[in-house]
Image: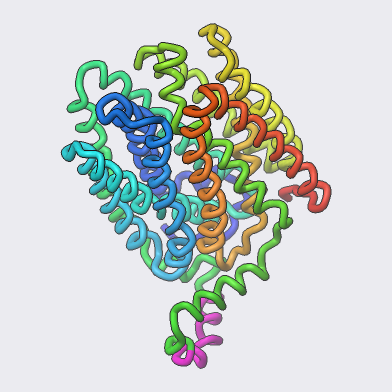
């Protein structure tokens, strides 16, 4: 099978590619592991065993996002030059190390180190997967490509806490055996990812890449003697000039993930301490919201490719902005279930449309680096949201993170109104 097929007319054939399947397997398992650790294991362990406050837990988990965020942009740059296998494998080794620390070393300082290593190790995940998926799909199927990627993400990040919550009813040993087994599968899968050869063909054809290489051969020796900082600055300046994005897209990316970061550290605390759900009950609620989101991603992705992103984002932002504050104020479990379903529907509209919108702003020739840059902006919002979430909980009560998250989604809705007014977005 050829490593590159160019732009695909549809999003069907590309999912038969071994490369895409490998990326989705890695995405699913890594997010399964991170979901299990960050949502189910670490908040409960740090709160009940180590006795940390919600603010301290938020800071510890934020280190994971900080580690992830700091390395996304340089890793995107490395993907463009070294290929997928080397970059991803280095990250997987660090991720595996963090899992082993959490499993076998029970001390606050080592848990903090494990959180940081988890972030650094998983930082190649999104640049690699999104770059590979959008490269294979082409512009005409970017909505479907992002839908399938996010199905793997959502199923992984949802299945992790769900499976672990059921296993925790018996012991932590079974939970960590499952997590470690998954990491072994990831290591083996990563070994089969394409290396640097694939990246040379990424822009459309090997001949074109070779011609481009020849045209720059005369300057190679001079450029190699320049300091790395100078070369990197020139590279990102060139990338910045080729972006096709409204300037309002940058704060919008930050706000979108800030609203999510506000909820990540406190969802389990809310379920256990406010709603008084058992681990099994909490799992069923996660299944309810996650299933609606996952089932909606593929059809919404297809409609996004045909109709554009505008109205899906309008509807999704408003649904999530209204339902999240209601979730924080509700105690009736049947009503909570309905609200969770509405949140899931909102994000089923947001996820494929939002990422298709971003994908259109990215130049094909530097896809890895720009995805890394954009993911860094999004990750910054996640870091700040995670840190402030616990502080809001401790200072103003459990409702505060939900209220602020809803308010941020309303801000995002307004930003999107201006983005679409200045730069209408349609995928043709």
Left or right of 199? Residue 37 is left
Residue 116 is one of the magenta-drawn residues: no
Task: Between residue 107 and residue 99, name the one nearer to us.
Answer: 107
Quarter of the figure that contains the N terminus: bottom left
Magenta segment range? 207-222
Tell me which corner region of the image, top left, top right, bottom left or bottom right, holds residue 317.
Answer: top right
- The image position of residue 385, as x and y in percent, is 53, 40
Task: Between residue 134 and residue 115, name the one nearer to us.
Answer: 115
Q: Which residue is drawn at 60% across and 63% down?
A: 364
Q: Residue at x 48, y 39 (%)?
A: 386
Q: Which residue is drawn at 47% across and 77% down?
A: 229
Q: How is the image coloured?
A: rainbow
- The image position of residue 185, as x and y in percent, is 26, 43
Q: Residue at x 55, y 29 (%)?
A: 401
Task: Between residue 215 and residue 116, name the one nearer to us.
Answer: 116
Tell me which corner region of the image, top left, top right, bottom left or bottom right, holds residue 260.
Answer: top right
- Is 161 located above or below residue 229 in the figure? above
Task: Tell me if I can see residue 295 in this picture.
Answer: no
């Amino acid at each position: 099978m050829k490593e590159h097929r160019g732009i695909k007319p549809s999003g069907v054939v590309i999912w038969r590619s071994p490369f895409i399947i490998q990326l989705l397997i890695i995405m699913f398992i890594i997010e399964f592991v991170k979901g299990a650790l960050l949502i189910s294991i670490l908040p409960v362990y740090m709160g009940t065993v180590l006795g940390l406050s919600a603010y301290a837990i938020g800071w510890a988990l934020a280190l994971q996002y900080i580690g992830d965020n700091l390395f996304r942009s340089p890793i995107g740059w490395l993907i463009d030059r070294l290929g997928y296998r080397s970059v991803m494998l280095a990250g997987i080794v660090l991720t595996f190390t963090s899992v082993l620390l959490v499993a076998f070393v029970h001390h606050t300082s080592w848990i903090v180190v494990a959180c940081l290593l988890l972030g650094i190790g998983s930082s190649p995940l999104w640049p690699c997967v999104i770059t590979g998926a959008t490269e294979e799909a082409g512009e005409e199927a970017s909505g479907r490509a992002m839908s399938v990627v996010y199905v793997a993400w959502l199923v992984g990040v949802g299945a992790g806490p769900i499976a672990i919550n059921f296993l925790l009813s018996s012991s932590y040993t079974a939970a960590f055996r499952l997590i470690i087994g998954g990491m072994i599968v990831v290591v083996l899968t990563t070994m089969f990812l394409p290396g640097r050869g694939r990246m040379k063909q990424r822009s459309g054809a090997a001949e074109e890449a070779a011609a481009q290489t020849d045209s720059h051969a005369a300057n190679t020796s001079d450029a190699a003697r320049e300091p790395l900082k100078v070369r990197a600055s020139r590279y990102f300046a060139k990338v910045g000039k080729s972006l096709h994005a409204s300037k309002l897209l940058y704060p919008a990316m930050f706000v979108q993930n800030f609203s999510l970061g506000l909820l990540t550290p406190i969802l389990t605390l809310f379920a256990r301490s406010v709603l008084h759900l058992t681990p099994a009950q909490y799992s069923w609620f996660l299944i309810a919201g996650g299933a609606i989101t996952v089932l909606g991603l593929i059809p919404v992705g297809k409609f996004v490719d045909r109709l554009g992103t505008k109205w899906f984002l309008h509807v999704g932002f408003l649904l999530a902005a209204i339902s999240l504050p209601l979730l924080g104020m509700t105690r009736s479990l049947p009503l909570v279930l309905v609200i969770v379903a509405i949140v899931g529907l909102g994000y089923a509209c947001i996820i494929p449309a939002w990422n298709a919108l971003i994908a259109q702003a990215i130049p094909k020739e530097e896809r890895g680096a720009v995805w890394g840059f954009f993911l860094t902006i999004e990750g910054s919002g996640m870091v700040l949201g995670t840190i402030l979430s616990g502080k809001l909980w401790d200072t103003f009560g459990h409702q505060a993170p939900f209220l602020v998250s809803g308010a941020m989604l309303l801000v995002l809705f307004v930003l999107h109104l201006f983005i679409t007014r200045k730069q209408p977005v349609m995928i043709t």
